[in-house]
Amino acid sequence: MGRLMGLDVGSRTVGVAVSDMLGWTAQGVEIVQINEDEQEFGLDRIAELVKENEVVGFVLGLPKNMNNTSGPRVEAAKAYGELLEEKFNLPIDFIDERLTTVEAERMLVEQADASRKKRKKVIDKLAASLILQNYLDAKGKLLKELN
């Protein structure tokens, strides 16, 4: 099996993480700058990372509201997934990512004692890693399909 790529899609950045080859652990890779307003989605950099990491599928976080409703960010994440599907022709799955950014921030404050400025530089990458790790732990459908 190749690696899965986990993405935390925002309006200005996309946090990127990849799994190990066995699909057991997720590691944060980087934060890709995007600009939704100007239709710049960082797909060239994502393509480089897909190739470098032998990615065989994508997992995107869906930032649902706490009451399980979908807001505009959920629609944006789904639209980004469609862009990925068109460009790479690789399978895509989504996972509820409620509170992953909150969890990432808490981890950085409590465990790393990171300043606000430092947290801002790594939070999306850590959130992507948490999204992907949660997916791997839940044995998401891509793991079954790709094995």
Image (cartoon, helix red, strand yellow):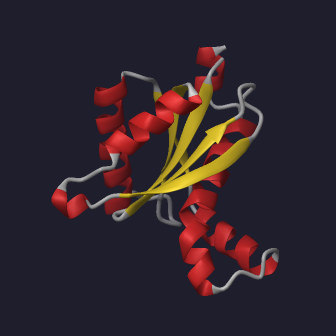
Tell me if residue 8 comes above or below residue 147 in the rendering.
below
Q: Tell me which residue sits at (40%, 35%) in the image.
A: 47
Quadrant where the image shows the N terminus: top right
In the picture, measured across the screen, residue 140 lies left or right of residue 23, that is left
Q: Nearer the viewer, residue 105 or 49?
A: 49
- Locate residue 127, reporting x and y percent: 60, 59
Q: Quadrant of residue 115?
A: bottom right
Quadrant where the image shows the C terminus: top right
Counting the numbered discs, the total is 0
Kindly give the residue lying farthest to the right in the view shown.
111
Tell me if residue 50 comes above or below residue 135 in the rendering.
above
- Locate residue 91, reporting x and y percent: 46, 24
Q: Tell me which residue sits at (34%, 63%) in the image.
A: 11
Q: Quadrant of residue 118?
A: bottom right
Q: Nearer the viewer, residue 96 or 12?
A: 12
Q: Nearer the viewer, residue 5 or 93?
A: 5
Q: Nearer the viewer, residue 16 or 83?
A: 16
- Locate residue 49, reporting x and y percent: 49, 38
Q: Quadrant of residue 6?
A: top right
Tell me if residue 59 comes above or below residue 57 in the rendering.
below
Inspect this view and state whether residue 137 appears: yes
In the picture, measured across the screen, residue 122 lies left or right of residue 22, that is left
Q: Tell me which residue sits at (19%, 53%) in the image.
A: 39
- Locate residue 13, reporting x and y percent: 41, 61
Q: Tell me which residue sits at (77%, 34%) in the image.
A: 24
